């Protein structure tokens, strides 16, 4: 939060794609841009196309839900947006950087700097305290111990876990674990927070708390992409993209990327963090 | 990513499964410990042989009479028509006197020896009986525990006197003082004038079961005036041994009209015995070391095995780490460090165990640590960690993050 990462990194941005019409104040460069992305698994007879030409731009400060049934290609989409995998055809750019030409090492650095992951299964590292888990991406970024600690503590306070910093994942509830994961995702000040079914393993109350955290983060300026099949979760987003059989079949704009998230500020919630 | 941070991750990884880490470490511990211990045992036995040989006297040289066995068979065909061919000759007191003239020689003691039955009253003992001059005693590093040596005068007049070895004296007289008593050597009475101090066993036979009498007396009564069995030459200093050895050879070659090929004598010094013995001991040490090295190798394979299990078990963790920005290099470094730490901890404990083990006497050998074996065994164990950890670490580094995250 204190270290602004370059939003407009080097790399030529193709200007051929028309920007979404609903966007009121078009930005020069989207945070992520998929251009006719095709992803094929396997070869020859056994080849399966998980994505069949997906094009999508996500602007800064936007809050996008990608919805689809299982097998629709949303996991593949998540892998590509998360730089965990590269497209077979087409282009994927994050902050203007084309991932197609990058090797494993460069992709790892890109994930570290640009993306904060929140997974369905929390994916905290066992036997490491909440604080150590949140510090981990900063370790990989090469920050000094004192700076890591300061930032990790700030991130944990932001998700309301100031008092559980030294607890191990096993000592935390599911909702708390997921909030540690959110703290870990945002601690590097990434360009994008990418959440894959973040409420999938949570009860209703913990789900609502978590989505509230996402709403506040978005209101504070974070760009968020949530992959989900739950309408309740998608209702928090400013834009809902439907995906089916590897194609985008719906793209509904609820509020402008710059506006506050639609469900922010429900009664009984804390103040908006700055 | 700092090395200290990688080390911290690796330590946390090892601590996550302490029993497994400890058992893997044990493999290397046994390997390194046995290298140090077995090499020390080899070294210790070689040193005890060397000590035994050097107790023969560092500056004494023994000229042994041999039959020149190779010469008569080979000579007629190869030296046909030459006049240089010589029959094997006896080693004589004249030869001994000639050797006394050589440079750097302190004393020359011609000796004959035979095995005879000694008896005193009802007790008897079979011992080696040597006939020689008094200079034999210092040359052979013998010292007295009672009485005195016989004199050159007694040799010249062929007196029936004898100096007993400590074991021969105990066998015949028990605890009584033998000096002044008369023993029968092959039925001939000899007066005991002295008893030698115990030298202890050297190799397989006792060096103390002997009787030493004047050369002339023994030749007269027991062996006859044939060849001497050996001549013990004492060099003025240990440093002169090699040059005196050379002189002895050339003097005797000349006197016996010999070439090196058909010599009827053999020149032995402590240093020649020592070099033979140490090459034997070296082979022994190498064999022991090889056995230990194999156990170290097995320990290394244990590391590969356990690291492969660890990497598989922690696939998901590897996926998480990669997703949040660990590069393949960092993952490789973490798992290599884990393997190397296992090996080095095992190595350090192995050094400790090996060093403690050498405090004890093992199968009658007091182990002597070869200093080089410690850094070597430890260094090899670290290398084993790097080498045997390399394959699993590489597998972890190359895992695809998307697949690793899905792994259950």
Image (tube, grey):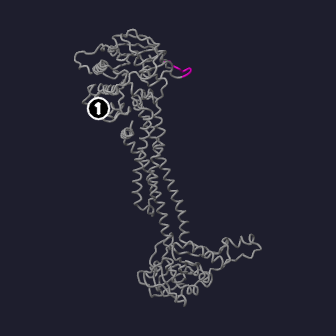
Q: Residue at x 40, y 28 (%)?
A: B323
Residues A36 and B268: in front is A36
Q: Which residue sits furthest bottom? A: B157
Q: Secondary structure at mark 1?
A: helix
In percent of width and height, residue A236 lies at 32, 15
Residue A223 drawn above or below residue A143: above
Q: Quadrant of the N terminus of chain B?
A: top left
In percent of width and height, residue B231 lies at 57, 79
What range of the chain is rendered magenta? A43-49
Q: Quadrant of the C terminus of chain B?
A: top left
- Residue B71: in magenta span: no
* Disc 1: CA contacts within 10 A as few (<14), some (14-19) or many (>=20): few
- Residue A47: in magenta span: yes
Q: Which residue sits furthest top? A: A21
Residues A136 and B276: in front is A136
Residue B246 drawn above or below residue A56: below
Q: Chain of mark 1?
A: A
In percent of width and height, residue A100 lies at 48, 23
Reading the image, the residue beneath label 1 is: A150
Residue A204 can be seen, yes or no: no
Residue A106 drawn above or below residue B261: above
Q: Could you tell whether B293 is left or right of A206 in the image?
A: right
Residue A237 can be seen, yes or no: yes
Q: Which residue sits furthest left? A: A268
In percent of width and height, residue B57 lies at 50, 74
Q: Residue at x 35, y 19 (%)?
A: A223
């Amino acid at each position: 939060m204190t270290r602004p990462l370059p939003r407009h990194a080097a790399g030529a941005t193709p200007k051929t794609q028309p920007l979404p019409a609903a966007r009121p104040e078009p930005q020069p460069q989207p945070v992520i841009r998929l251009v006719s992305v095709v992803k094929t698994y396997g070869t020859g007879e056994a080849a399966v196309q998980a994505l069949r030409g997906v094009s999508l731009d996500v602007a800064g400060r936007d809050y996008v839900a990608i919805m689809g049934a299982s097998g629709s290609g949303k996991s593949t989409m998540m892998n590509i947006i998360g730089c965990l995998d590269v497209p077979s055809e087409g282009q994927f750019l994050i902050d203007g950087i084309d991932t197609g030409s990058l090797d494993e090492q460069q992709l790892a650095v890109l994930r570290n700097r640009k993306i904060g992951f929140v997974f369905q299964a929390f994916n905290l590292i066992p036997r490491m305290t909440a604080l150590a888990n949140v510090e981990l991406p900063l370790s990989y970024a090469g920050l000094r111990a004192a700076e890591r600690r300061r930032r990790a503590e700030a991130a944990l306070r932001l998700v309301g876990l100031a008092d559980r910093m030294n607890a191990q994942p096993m000592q935390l509830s599911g909702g708390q674990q997921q909030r540690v994961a959110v703290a870990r995702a945002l601690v590097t000040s990434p360009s994008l927070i990418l959440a894959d079914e973040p409420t999938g393993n949570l009860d209703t109350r913990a789900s609502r708390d978590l989505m509230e955290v996402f709403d506040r983060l978005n209101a504070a300026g974070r760009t968020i992409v949530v992959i989900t099949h739950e309408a309740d979760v998608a209702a928090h987003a400013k834009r809902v993209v439907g995906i089916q059989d590897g194609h985008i079949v719906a793209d509904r704009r609820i509020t402008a990327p710059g506006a506050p998230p639609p469900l922010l500020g429900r009664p009984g919630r804390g103040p908006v963090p700055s | 990513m700092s090395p200290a941070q990688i080390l911290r991750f690796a330590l946390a990884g090892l601590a996550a499964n302490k029993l497994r880490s400890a058992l893997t470490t044990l493999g290397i511990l046994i390997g390194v410990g046995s290298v140090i211990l077995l090499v020390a045992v080899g070294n210790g036995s070689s040193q005890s042989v060397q000590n035994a040989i050097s107790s023969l006297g560092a500056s004494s040289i023994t000229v042994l009479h041999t039959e020149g066995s190779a010469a008569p068979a080979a000579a007629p065909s190869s030296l046909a028509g030459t006049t240089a061919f010589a029959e094997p000759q006896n080693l004589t007191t004249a030869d001994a006197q000639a050797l006394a003239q050589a440079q750097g020689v302190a004393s020359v003691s011609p000796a004959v020896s035979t095995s005879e039955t000694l008896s005193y009253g009802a007790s008897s003992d079979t011992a080696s009986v040597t006939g020689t001059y008094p200079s034999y005693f210092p040359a052979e590093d013998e010292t007295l525990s009672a009485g005195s040596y016989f004199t050159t005068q007694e040799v010249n007049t062929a007196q029936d006197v004898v100096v007993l070895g400590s074991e021969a004296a105990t066998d015949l007289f028990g605890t009584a003082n033998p000096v002044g008593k008369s023993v029968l050597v092959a039925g001939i009475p000899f007066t005991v004038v002295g008893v030698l101090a115990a030298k202890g066993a050297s190799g397989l036979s006792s060096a103390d079961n002997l009787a030493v009498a004047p050369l002339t007396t023994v030749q007269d009564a027991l062996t006859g005036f044939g060849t001497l069995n050996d001549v013990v030459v004492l060099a003025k200093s240990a440093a002169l041994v090699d040059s005196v050895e050379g002189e002895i050879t050339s003097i005797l070659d000349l006197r016996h009209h010999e070439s090196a090929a058909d010599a009827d004598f053999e020149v032995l010094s402590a240093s020649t015995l020592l070099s033979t013995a140490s090459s034997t001991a070296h082979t022994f040490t190498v064999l022991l070391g090889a056995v230990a090295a194999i156990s170290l190798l097995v320990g290394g394979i244990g590391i590969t095995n356990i690291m492969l299990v660890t990497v598989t078990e922690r696939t998901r963790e590897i996926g998480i780490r990669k997703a949040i920005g660990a590069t393949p290099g960092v993952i490789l470094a973490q798992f290599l460090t884990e393997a190397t730490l296992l090996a080095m901890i095992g190595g350090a404990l192995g050094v400790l165990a090996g060093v403690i083990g050498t405090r004890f006497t093992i199968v009658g050998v007091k182990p002597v640590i070869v200093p080089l074996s410690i850094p070597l065994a430890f260094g090899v164990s670290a290398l084993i960690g790097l080498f045997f950890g390399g394959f699993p670490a590489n597998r972890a580094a190359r895992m695809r993050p998307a697949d690793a995250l899905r792994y259950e």
